[in-house]
Amino acid sequence: MKRLLWLHTGGTIACTQSEEGLSPSFASSTLMQILGNLIGQYEIFTEDLFTLDSSNIQPEEWVIIAKRIGENVESYDGIVVTHGTDTMAYTASALSFMLKNCPIPVVLTGSQLPLDHPLSDGVDNLRCAFAMASSDMPGVFVAFNRKIILGTRAVKVRTTSFDAFESVNYPAVAVVDSSGLRIHELFIPPVFDAFELCTNLCKEVMLIKLIPGMNPAILDAMKPLGIKGVVIEAFGIGGLSFVRRDFSEKISQLINQGIAVVVCSQCLYERADFSRYEVGKKALMNGVIEARDMTSEACVTKLMWALGQTHNLSKVRELMMSNLVYEIGSE
């Protein structure tokens, strides 16, 4: 019987209705009682880290979760983390980088309806999460709507549907169907080295989405605010304006001030390629780091992590452009 640890952080799956709306309140022990013998084939140990709406889960909480996982990777066959859906993709990506060479499955899941609701999707999501956690596949994953998604590829794309998450620019690493849990091992990053816990994060990172006509002077606020890294969601395959409103020049100024600038596409699918058009080439010439097909969630958390490992911008660039846990595609 596989020994699994269930770390609980709150979210909709643990919510009850109050006068002020849904609020996380159930502990993991209560959720276990609701599930009953549906997960009786595992030896499950529970721990409540905190009871938060995921909108309130921030880098400080990511570190707590990562450290608790790190303390237990040798004691359990797998770990399930219940978490609110709104920021689950950020947490999954952050854990993917902080848990370097993670030797066991760490699976995040949650639900769109509280677990005590008679139509809750949480029951299936938890069952899939525990199945993946017992699979011996190393790494960080998201289990949702009978799909298992690599932690750095998960994006929440729907607000109310049970099919809330997509695996963006990468196949789902496993699915649940009439054959059971079908795992595609080729899609799972291999682990060759010893586990290492790398929890240093730089929280001074900003994400900016460009719109036509945006004033580049907004970037002047980065240095006074103490921002160390900026992720810019540019247009299409890689465009930033330089006529009338010159973002290229402002970005060059940021880089000269020692601020790391990463550019990705606003498009959810497919890769950015800033070498394609003049508007993108100017950005590359000014020293930006190209995110290629990384999700915005992976890009932001990876930059936080990279800046937490080093202050040297050349080394930050090297880390950002290295494919560490399949967050970057081959094309």
Image: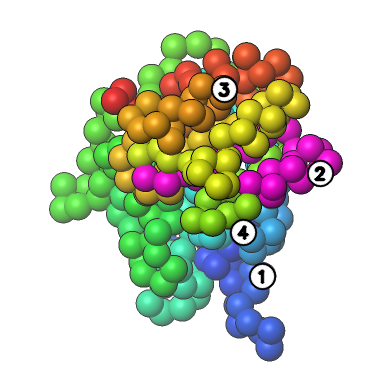
Secondary structure of the residue carrying numbered label 3: loop
Which residue occupies 44% across, 56% down? 156
Mark 2 to mark 4 CA distance (whole Å): 25 Å
Could you tell me residue 310's position as x and y percent?
71, 18
Residue 25 bears which disc, if any? 1
Three-letter code for the amino acid on which mark 4 is drawn: Ser
**Which is more N-terminal, label 3 or label 2?**
2
| Nearest the eye: 310 or 243 | 243
Could you tell me residue 46's position as x and y percent?
61, 50
Could you tell me residue 26's position as x and y percent?
63, 68
Secondary structure of the residue carrying numbered label 1: loop
Magenta span has 225?
yes
Secondary structure of the residue carrying numbered label 2: loop
Pointer 2 residue: 225
Q: From this view, report whether residue 250 is shown above or below residue 32.
A: above
Pointer 3 residue: 287
Which residue occupies 36% across, 66% down? 162
Mark 4 to mark 1 CA distance (whole Å): 13 Å
**Which span of residues is magenta-colored?**
216-236
Which residue occupies 68% across, 40% down? 205
Three-letter code for the amino acid on which mark 1 is drawn: Ser
- The reply to whether dot 3 and dot 1 touch (C-beta < 8 Å) is no
Q: Nearer the viewer, mark 2 or mark 3?
A: 3
The outermost residue toward the left is: 178
Three-letter code for the amino acid on which mark 3 is drawn: Gly
Q: Is residue 133 left or right of residue 67?
A: left
- Residue density around tag 3, few if under 14, some if 14–19, many if 20 or more, within 10 Å: some
Mark 1 to mark 2 CA distance (whole Å): 36 Å
Q: Is residue 254 visible?
A: yes
Q: Nearer the viewer, mark 4 or mark 1?
A: 4
**Which is more N-terminal, label 3 or label 4?**
4
Q: Is residue 223 left or right of residue 5?
A: right
